[in-house]
Image: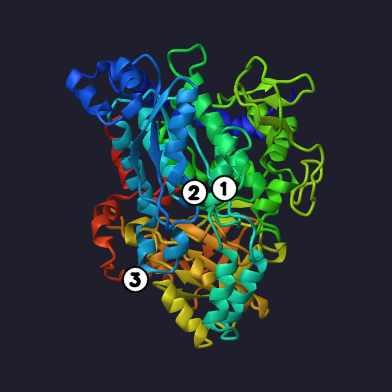
Amino acid sequence: MTDLHPTIAAVTDRIIARSAPRRAAYLGLMERQRAAGTNRGNLSCGNLAHGFAASGEDKPAIRAGATMNIGIVTAYNDMLSAHQPYGRYPEQIKLFAREAGATAQVAGGVPAMCDGVTQGQAGMDLSLFSRDTIAQGTAIALSHAMFEGALLLGICDKIVPGLLIGALRFGHLPTILVPAGPMPSGLANKEKQRVRQLYAEGKASRDELLEAEAASYHGAGTCTFYGTANSNQMMMELMGLHIPGSAFVNPGTKLRQELTRAATHRLARIGWDGDDYRPLARCIDEKAIVNACIGLLATGGSTNHAIHLPAIARAAGIVIDWQDFDELSHVVPLLARVYPNGAGDVNHFHAAGGIGFVVRELLAAGLLHGDILTVGGTMADYGYEPVLEDVIPGESRGPVATSDDGSRLSPGITSLAWRPAPEFSRDDTMLRPVAAPFSPDGGMRLLAGNLGRAIIKTSAVAEDRWTIEAPCRIFDDQDQVLAAFKAGELERDVIVVVRFQGPRANGMPELHKLTPALGVLQDRGFRVALLTDGRMSGASGKVPAVIHLSPEALPGADGVSGPLALLADGDVVRVCAVKGEVLALVDPVIWSARSPAAPPPPALGVGRELFALFRHHADEAEKGGSAMLAAMETVI
């Protein structure tokens, strides 16, 4: 086995040392929960009778308590295309559980909002905090102590992080995430973006724009660009929380159904009563978190996970920061170009060799931890891809059995097998080996300076735009930016500053609505960048976007505003991904004499008032932007 890269080893060791007290406290709590807490054997007769009263033909088995009862937590709704396929999953999972000698019940549902629907709308202010609501809903679902394992049905932006954060409170349970897959490819994402820019310039009608959008987002499944939702699925593979190779299989296919069956059967095998117990608390450790970060860098994944991954880690007693991302980015090569970093979408990426190819390449190069505890065998098993064929299962070794020809067979399933990912990329415009990457750098950088700390994603940005120095124009919301664009006020080199967009100010909405307008300015030859304490979409692309700036402009609990509140129109700002800088080039005497800008009044309506508690107590983006996690750490 190739030795682990020294930088990855050093970053991992630093995280382990930094996290030691919290991690030990968390693992101790999980051990106590298994023994005396969330355990069906501890329920009284009345408790138990309530739990199986409506379980139909599974009632005798649940009552007897001799077999695993699986709790299903579902994010199903039929408005969100990615989650619509989950509608029939509980019925299927109950059948699959019986095949494995287990039972299953829907433990509860969690909300699943769509950033694609709320993008640029008032509802987006609820988006980040929906993650904590989902975590709380997951905890409520699993709190009934009726379950010895959990299947989590969720796929999109805040939903997977929320499900994991909640499930980690029940980390003594073996837990598998069950994806539903991306929709088939429709209108090319690059063509969709072209029409968006034409519309921003007034050169395309609303009908033409709607036709392009409908041709792109056209059916059930995740959106096909490589944003936060599909980055979630990649991370679950790199953390070993999926059945191997299941991330990007399309909905409604036989292969997708068989992978759901395999997840259910596998969960029944890794419970605490057997000799292969794999609790979630042990699967998500420091090495698994580092693997997720490496996967993001190697595939050009969503910048939103610079917020979500620290939050997931915190829930497991692990502390990571943006310096960890930055140091890993310098040694992890970019192996994939998926839109918006390239022309093809996740279906093309999957067809080219997908995650199996990436995992095998990273492991072989010493760029990935191969010794993590996964739900599906070893990390090496994630270097395989699932296929349907007629096979005769043999004795199981881990999640899969090995046939005479070296292919891997799912135990008890006659049509599902795993074969090695292709030796060579099937499309080197989409996917390349470590020996010939698109870039030697993972493309996610930490910027720091007198304006604070921020993240920039460079993998889709031309290198001649990694450094932008220009006068800034200040805005308090994205609609002001679009109004200035339409009025021709931004036709110059400019750094567009959108402040009071942090977690405490308004819930840190994504500012993806700005992408077409800023892209138009860049295409006209201007040197343009975005600087904000808010978020950019996981689909952030060719325009340099310096995001998640911390501390945010809104005053914190100490009454002190972030430096971003001191900027004024016309100040020259320098953002540089080469040197890792975000600087206001203002005379220090003038800077120190300024008073911070007054924040806008809190926005009302669309339920935003319900999340005031989350906003008032949220901590900084680098820690995950969560009031819930910040408060939780004071009691454990």
User: Which residue is label 2 attached to?
Assistant: 85
Q: Secondary structure at mark 2?
A: helix
- Distance between mark 2 and mark 3 Cα atoms: 47 Å
The N terminus lies in quadrant: top right
Q: Name which residue lies at 32% across and 19% down.
A: 60
Q: What number of labels is visible? A: 3
User: Which residue is label 3 attached to?
Assistant: 597
Q: Is residue 277 left or right of residue 413?
A: left
- Residue 524 lies, in percent from the top left, at 66, 81
Q: Nearer the viewer, residue 225 or 57?
A: 57
Q: Name which residue lies at 33% across and 57% down.
A: 504
Tell me whether the residue at label 2 lies in contact with that at label 1, contact meaning CB atoms closer than 8 angstroms.
yes
Q: Nearer the viewer, residue 446 or 518?
A: 518
Image quadrant where residue 565 sits = bottom left
- Residue 20 lies, in percent from the top left, at 44, 25
The C terminus lies in quadrant: top left
User: Which residue is label 1 attached to?
Assistant: 251
Q: Secondary structure at mark 1?
A: loop
* Within-10-Å neighbours for mark 2: few <14, some 14–19, many 20+: some
Q: Nearer the viewer, residue 197 or 457?
A: 197
- The vertical placement of 371 against 486, above or below, is above
Image quadrant where residue 363 sits = top right
Disc 2 marks a residue whose amino acid type is Pro
Disc 3 marks a residue whose amino acid type is Ala
